[in-house]
Image: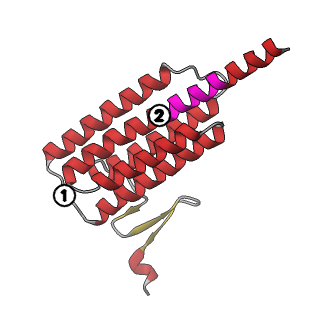
Amino acid sequence: MTEKNNLNNDTGEEVRNNLREAGDALLSAGAAIGAALSKATGELSDRFKTATEDARQNLSNANTEGEVRGAATNFTDEAEKLFNSLREGDLQFTDDVKAKLRSTIDEARAAFNERLDGTQTEGIEGTVDDLRARFEGLVQRIQDQFAGEKTDGDIIDGEIVDNSNSTTVNVEDLKK
């Protein structure tokens, strides 16, 4: 019976280590992107380092999938707040800076995916999928905000497009 308990403890510890590895992959990728943005803007460095350190501490204390997800959520939320504070400054990036940011994002994404692919995820697939989705969402918003990548919106030249019945309403008509 003791042998079975040791096996369960070893398996549980292995799962926790795999969860931490997956979470650390997210933090490392996010930290690389944050460092590049801090360098490009001259801002955020200390605040981003603090957010990363807090997330690493929370991750190292995590014992469950929920705690890992919580650490990842807190980190991505804090990173997005910091990135939004930059956007509010209406910064303009040169093409060289945009290219460097895109390159850093691509490298961070590749390193993140490589680490997750190399991590044993059996039994924690949902958490790994959640971490991937959070990272990709954060990366997409960063690209939209800072790297010159724009997505198509639903409002075009003062028109409101109602997707439910394909009716187009001109904003000027609403003012009458």
Mark 2 neighbour class, 10 Å CA radius: few under 14, some 14 to 19, many 20 or more: many
Look at label 1 and name its amino acid: Gln
Disc 1 is placed on an element classified as loop
Q: Residue 160 at what x, y percent from top left?
A: 45, 67
**Which residue is rendered at x = 44% and y = 24% of the image?**
115
Q: Residue 139 at what x, y percent from top left?
A: 39, 43
Query: In front of the other: label 1 or label 2?
Result: 2
Query: For this rendering, which residue is in front, 175 or 141?
Result: 141
Q: Mark 2 points at which residue?
A: 24
User: For the stretch drawn in magenta, what is the main secondary structure?
Assistant: helix
Query: Does 51 appear above or below 115?
Result: below
Q: Name the residue under label 1.
A: 92
Residue bounds of the magenta highlight: 13-23
Query: Does 40 appear above or below 65?
Result: below
**Which residue is rendered at x = 33% and y = 66% of the image?**
157
| Real-space CA distance between mark 1 and mark 2, rounded to the nearest whole angstrom | 31 Å
